[in-house]
Amino acid sequence: LCHRRKVWAAEFGLMFSSIVRGSTVARRAFAGHRGGRSMTTISVPGTTARCRRPTPAVSSAGGKRVDSAVPERRVRTRTSGAPRAVVSPRRRTRRSLTGARALPPFVDEIPAFLANPSPGLAPAAAANTVVFTGGIKVLLKGLTWPGVINSWFLGTTVMAAFGVGGYVLVCLYFVFGSAVTKIKLEQKQAEGIAEARGGRRGVGSVWGSGIAGIACACLALAGVGPGENLWRLGFVASFCSKLSDTTASEVGKAYGKTTYMSTPPFRSVPRGTEGAVSLEGTVAGIGASLGFAGVAAAAGQVDLTGALIATLAAFIATTAESWLRATT
């Protein structure tokens, strides 16, 4: 019994080795079939499996065996002195053009210009020209052509002395003053108390409104007087007074129910009378001066105390102007 077990184990081992050999040959035959090699049929001893084996055409070349059935694999090599492939100059140039482009020199100076409280005449003239060119249609709605030209000098001088903040105040005065002038314009025209030319201001109105502010700007540029801050306060107070006077006059003409002369005995007079005041116009003028002074404080032209001083000065100046008109 032991002898038979040994025989059976030997036969089983022989059979297992034959099967393993047959599967290995079959795997090689399948790989050769996929590579396009010619095949020959072989049989594995001790098994019933049959497979095909490639029959390479072997030739001798320089002592090496070369299989003609296997395609030659070409490997690119580079000598130590040969340069590597680089991107063509044209493609590299196009890529560089699509990258970051250099900005004009003045672009880098814009933040410093905006933050400068007194940038000077040359930068102010250039910036003011750009604003006038872009907003000429809006300017012509409130000014005549001579008025536009003269207002350019006014705006340039103010920006040169008091920076962008002062220039914003002048623009605010123009926009708000033109807007209140248009209030109930047809009614004013029918009553004969409207501004001439449909409310468009001429040269006289431009300099009448801005002469005090221009004087403060010129004195600040020249370095004359007690200091730039005082001239800045005078500039704010002057435009605050003119806006208060314009608003009080135009709102009083449009909505004033009862108007009185500003001098004793304070008799009732029709709307639009020189020197007359109304409650509606007075309240509107005070509100306009407060708003303008608040914007001036926000723009850094004056502090809170300066804003209150400008508002009080506007009320006094408006009242005094009404009194002078009533007595002349």
Image: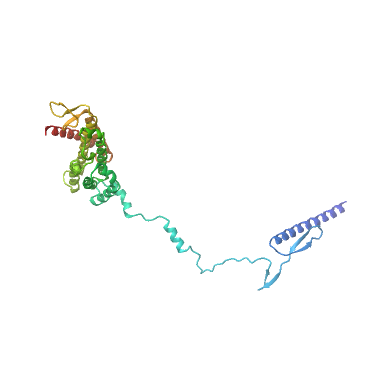
Left or right for 91, reference 269: right
- Residue lying farthest to the left in this orientation: 328
**Which residue: 16% across, 34% down?**
321
> How far across and how far down the image is residue 307, in percent?
23, 36
Q: Is residue 48 left or right of residue 248?
A: right
* Residue nearest the observer in this picture, 104 or 179: 179
- Give how far across and how far down residue 259 sits, in percent: 19, 28
Quadrant containing the C terminus is top left
312 lies left or right of 95: left
Q: Position of residue 253 (x, y in %)?
A: 22, 32
What colour scheme does the image use? rainbow
Q: Residue furthest front?
A: 190
Is 194 placed above or below 37 here?
above
Q: Nearer the viewer, residue 218 or 275?
A: 275
Count of numbered marks: 0
Quadrant of residue 234 within the rendered picture: top left
- For residue 246, which quarter of the picture? top left
Residue at figure coordinates x 17%, y 46% from the top left: 219
Between 199 and 75, the one lying in front of the other is 199
Q: In the rendered image of this protein, does residue 138 appear above or below residue 17?
A: above
Can residue 227 be seen here? The reply is no
In the image, is 135 to the left or to the right of 315? Answer: right
At 78% across and 56% down in the image, what residue appears? 19
Quadrant of residue 272 in the image? top left
Query: Does residue 300 sit above or below 282 in this rendering?
Result: below
Q: Farthest bottom residue?
A: 62
Q: Can residue 133 be seen?
A: yes
In percent of width and height, residue 122 lies at: 24, 52
